[in-house]
Amino acid sequence: MANDTHPADCLTVPVNLGERSYKIVLPGAGHPWPGDSATDFPTQSPGGLARSRNKSGLAFVVADRGAAPHLASLKASLEKAGYRVESTILDPGEGQKSLTVAASLYEKLLDLKADRKTLLAALGGGVTGDLTGYVAATYLRGLPFLMVPTTLLSMVDSSVGGKTGVNLSRGKNLVGCFHQPVGVWIDIGTLKTLPDREFRSGLAEVVKYGMIMDAPFLEILEQNVAPLMARDPAILGPVVARCCELKADVVSKDEREETGLRAILNYGHTFAHAYETVAGYGAWFHGEAVSAGMQAAAKLAAARGLIPSELVDRQRRLLEAFGLPVERDPTWPVDTMIEIMRSDKKAEAGQLRFILPVRAGEVRLFADVTVAEVVAALGPSK
Ligand SMILES: NC(=O)c1ccc[n+]([C@@H]2O[C@H](COP(=O)([O-])OP(=O)(O)OC[C@H]3O[C@@H](n4cnc5c(N)ncnc54)[C@H](O)[C@@H]3O)[C@@H](O)[C@H]2O)c1
Ligand SMILES: [Zn+2]
């Protein structure tokens, strides 16, 4: 599992990107935060992690209201590391990922007389991370940025890889850039307050890593359904660390989505995008759509003879054990879903492209998938 380069109970996952390299640090269960050991082991607290890469006197924390119970301890840790800490709390929701909200954060930074060294920290899920990262990337052409993800999805996915951005009224993530953080602090303990449906939604992305890259990890998930659902830190910590490690591996080989390798992370996502759109954004959580989307992709792969039907069933059993949906709503119009998939930003010249499993732990890109195959994988309609 992850390199245990820190004493005591900290797991550290390095993200190797040359001069933009950084560390993801996962304190173990029961780790005191802010740690008494912060001086001895400088990166064993979020403040210490930021301080190891940034010498500013000012830190500005952007926190999601849902993550607000964890704000006081983050502030205390940053203060202990010598920062003057200012913060703002945002209402939850995808709507916050907008140019309007970004502009209001620029104004706050101006009011605080922030300079190019000022640390910006995001405390919350993917919405807060993407928005705050975008503001960090663009204010004064770039501020150092600390990620403190507090949803399972943001821990295993959006906090690794440096993609930042906001939405436009005509689509999600249409404006953004790559901006790597100075560090990522993942405290599994913050998940205690996460609503159940959000937690389960994050588990879909966890299953995705097993299916696309790591068959032994898939088995670990299958053997630990109950403790994972109970959010037992003893298993959740190493599982989150492994996901970070797998994503970091892909990102370090294809930082800017140029070689095509990063596309494997989109397993199930072409279907998922169509499901989310026809359901109406928000009706299905992203991870729920990814779950049913992976199941459709696996069925498509089996119909092509790429995988045996046992693997389709195995994936379904695991997703169902995590309380995730595996079928789309049969009333959703098939034609509309096909149209959405054709206009997906990953489709080239309207040609449907899918990431499909070829065995447990391995996927490949297929650019020759026909509409008939997709319709069959979408399952029966009512
Ligand atoms: N940058 C990337 O590479 C990347 C990758 C995947 C997804 N994303 C983006 O991430 C976003 C989705 O992220 P998300 O699923 O984390 O959603 P989110 O940020 O909207 O958070 C989900 C909900 O959880 C609440 N919450 C957060 N932490 C909490 C906690 N500890 N306790 C209680 N409630 C808490 C929030 O208030 C919110 O209501 C999307 O905008 C998506 O585009 C980005
Ligand atoms: Zn996803």
Image (cartoon, helix red, strand yellow):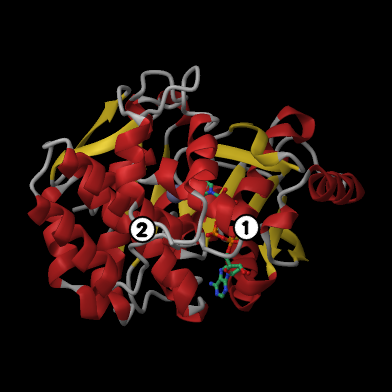
Rendering coords of residue 84 (x, y %):
74, 59
Eyeballing the image, is 306 above or below 347? Answer: below
Q: Which mark is residue 34?
A: none
Q: Can see residue 259?
A: yes
**Label 1 vs label 2: CA separation?**
17 Å
Eyeballing the image, is 49 above or below 77? Answer: above
Residue at 29%, 54% in the rendered image: 295
Quadrant of ligand 1: it is: bottom right
Rendering coords of residue 269 (x, y %):
42, 44
Marks 2 and 1: in contact by CB < 8 Å?
no
Rendered image quadrant of residue 72: bottom right
Total marks in image: 2
Is the residue indicated by label 1 positioned so its CB lies within 8 Å of ligand 1? no
Q: Which mark is residue 291?
A: 2
Quadrant including the C terminus: bottom left
Residue at 50%, 30% in the rendered image: 342
Rendering coords of residue 85 (x, y %):
73, 61
Rendering coords of residue 33 (x, y %):
48, 73
What secondary structure is found at the residue carrying circle 2? helix
